[in-house]
Amino acid sequence: MTLAQLLDRLAEDQAFTKNVRAWVTQPVQHAHFCDVPETFSASLKRVLSSRGIRQLYHHQRRAIDAVLAGDSVTISTPTASGKSLCYTLPILERTLREPESRALLIFPTKALAQDQRAEFQSWVDALEAPIGTYTYDGDTSAVVRRTIRSAGHVVLTNPDMLHTGILPHHTKWVKLFENLKYVVIDELHTYKGVFGSHVANVLRRLKRIARFYGSDPIFITCSATIRNPDELARRLTGTECQLIRESGAPRAEKHIVFYNPPVVNTQLGMRQSALIAARTLVRTLVTHRIQTIVFARSRLRVEVLLAYLREDAPRARIRGYRGGYLPRERRAIEKGLRRGEIDAVVATNALELGIDIGSLESSVLVGYPGSIASTWQQMGRSGRTDEPSLSILIASSSPLDQHIINHPDYFFDQSPEAALINPDNLIILVSHLKCAAFELPFTKGDRYGGQSIDEILQYLEEHRILHRSNDTWHWMAASFPANEISLRSAAPENVVIVDISHPQHQVIGEVDQFSAPLMVHEGAIYLHESRQYQVEELDFDDGKAYVREVDVNYYTDASLSVDVRVLDEFSKKEFPAGQHHLGEVQLTAQPTLYKKIRYFTHENIGWGRIHLPPREMHTSATWTAFAESFGESMGPGAMESALVGLSHLMREVAPLYLSCDRNDLYVVPQVRSPFTERPTLYLCDAYPGGIGLAERCHQILDDVFASCQALLEDCECDRGCPSCVGAAGEVGGATKSATHQLLSHLVVNT
């Protein structure tokens, strides 16, 4: 059965359509072409012609003309619009004419860099030109690294390797930096939040070293559709970039379906699990041989859904794909998708990026990805041919999912979110100034990121990290600063997962140290390609988790307890029922319990304690403290219910305004805060030092609280449910009404 036939059948299936909240069909869009530049060399024109490329899309020609004229550019067009040619062709053209020129291509992941290297190399092979094209990452051997430094015309890498492997050793890369003409930053939209803030500083260091060697590279940045690609490119690179966002690429017909699983318990407002709904829909697609990609929001959900689908369709070729799989597994899965040897893949957003996985017919999103930009990006992973495609968004019970699914106009009429970074976050800035001082000395009056840094350099001098000689600061500490800084705000080392089921122990995966306490604590069930392993020991000091293969009918889900202590208050504003504050806090996060969840029924069948030390960090927060008289008028039980209900709403709604993931925030209710001595609700950045989320939220609290109230009023449950304030009776039977009472004072008086 073809996809078109299946779509006709679904449209007539009342059991399916009664849960559809929107079915939008995007029409065919025809291409807008331009001629290939006359100035291209004969050999490049020949290769273009041999590949059937006799014209370029309008946006490709605009970008190429700008780059060849010496301008930096930002290309922000939809997925599958041929953005890679916007940098491949001008780099090849210049290298053919100037063999000494160099280009540095930066991709957010090793996998994407390796994928793009293969594509770039195919052009070089067709040209039969001596253009050295290499990937430089942690897997590159020492012998090859020496070759790359001397003969690499085009070097493809990732921000982490640029940070630790190239910039600190720039004296070995003289040929690259002396002749650096182009710096390409692909998947620009991924550089937001703490990661983007770090990478902006890495690029400041890159430009500083390039200037030292006498080069001033042109930046070519490529982004999926976000609201502020030009602003993000400017803040990330420190360079004004010409924005090109009108796509000339064609687009086939695409069907987008918003599906809300049915309510299975009206009284409690409980909906069918999004995983169960996805299981049914994906089984239908796979049965009819519709090649499908399924996006789930967590590693755990990927593994659980993978187990369900393999149970339902044992003959189908279904794979999982997520962080933690070994590189050779991921490469094999990508290759299988391209060749059509895999019927379906269940993935985290690790496959959201532009890795070549062929032409899939359908994409299924299990839960709202958290932003409009990510949703379009994941939906764009299907429909890369002239044939129609299907994308289905299946809502979970979370308040944010329910808000999006029941207000589809918000999604279809709204611009994608802005991507925010804060490269001048003091902790991030100081960390990279250490790296920059290691790379090249600073002189009094030097500016970094456009601002004076003498005061920070003096601070580092006082702490014997830098040594001042006359007006120049030199690195003097014994440590290697880049190794101490993770760009992704996790520990530099991962925890390796070792299978001890057999005499020959085998590494089967890895997990970052931040996630390890929740994923591989002792007693946890670790899932890998739907196989089950029980964690027998977590050795944090050695960075290893030892697991043994088991066959049980449950998986585990861990809980985290978070406590807040105020360190400093920066500002305060009054409202009749209390005050809104902004300041610095200390967060203490403690893994506490884990639940055993039965497969298929999702029943809680047991629990266990997690015995691990707490983790502490200083960060920024905004908090609302309610007047003591207000709390007394509501009563202690109602106030506790209201605070818990509002924290549930805030955790879902605030990311809409802050363009972040819900895991970037901690929302902590305290019935009697030790600092304010009153009922208080804290919203905190989940990163050391903060990245500006709490400050931004403090400025727009009125909008956030108003949206919380609207979402609460839209929900049809009586006493509270997972789609608004949490499960009914979670704290008390009147959670919804108490939360509504609390919000009525916040919204009216904010």
Image (cartoon, rainbow, N blue to C red):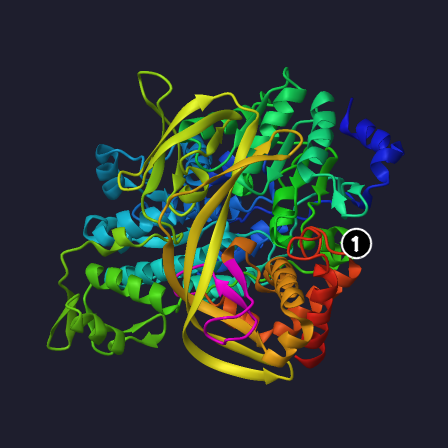
Q: Residue at x 35, y 63 (%)?
A: 428
Which quadrant of the structure image shows residue 745?
Answer: bottom right
168 left or right of 37 in image: left
Residue 560 is at least partly visible in this image = yes
In front: 392, or 155? 392
| Number of numbered callouts drawn | 1
125 left or right of 208 in image: right
On-image quarter of the N terminus? top right
Q: Which residues are magenta?
A: 665-690
On-image quarter of the C terminus? bottom right
435 left or right of 399 in image: left
Q: Residues within 10 Å of mark 1 (few under 14, many from 20)?
A: some
* Residue occupied by mark 1: 717
460 left or right of 555 in image: left
Q: Residue at x 56, y 46 (%)?
A: 36
Q: Is residue 672 magenta?
A: yes
Q: Position of residue 712 (x, y in %)?
A: 74, 61
Q: Position of residue 596 (x, y in %)?
A: 55, 35
Q: Position of residue 533 (x, y in %)?
A: 45, 26
Q: Residue at x 17, y 69 (%)?
A: 463
For badge 1, the amino acid type reads Cys
Q: Is residue 10 magenta?
A: no
Residue 68 is at least partly visible in this image = no
Which quadrant of the structure image shows residue 387?
Answer: top right
Q: Which residue is most to the left?
A: 469
Q: Position of residue 317 (x, y in %)?
A: 60, 20
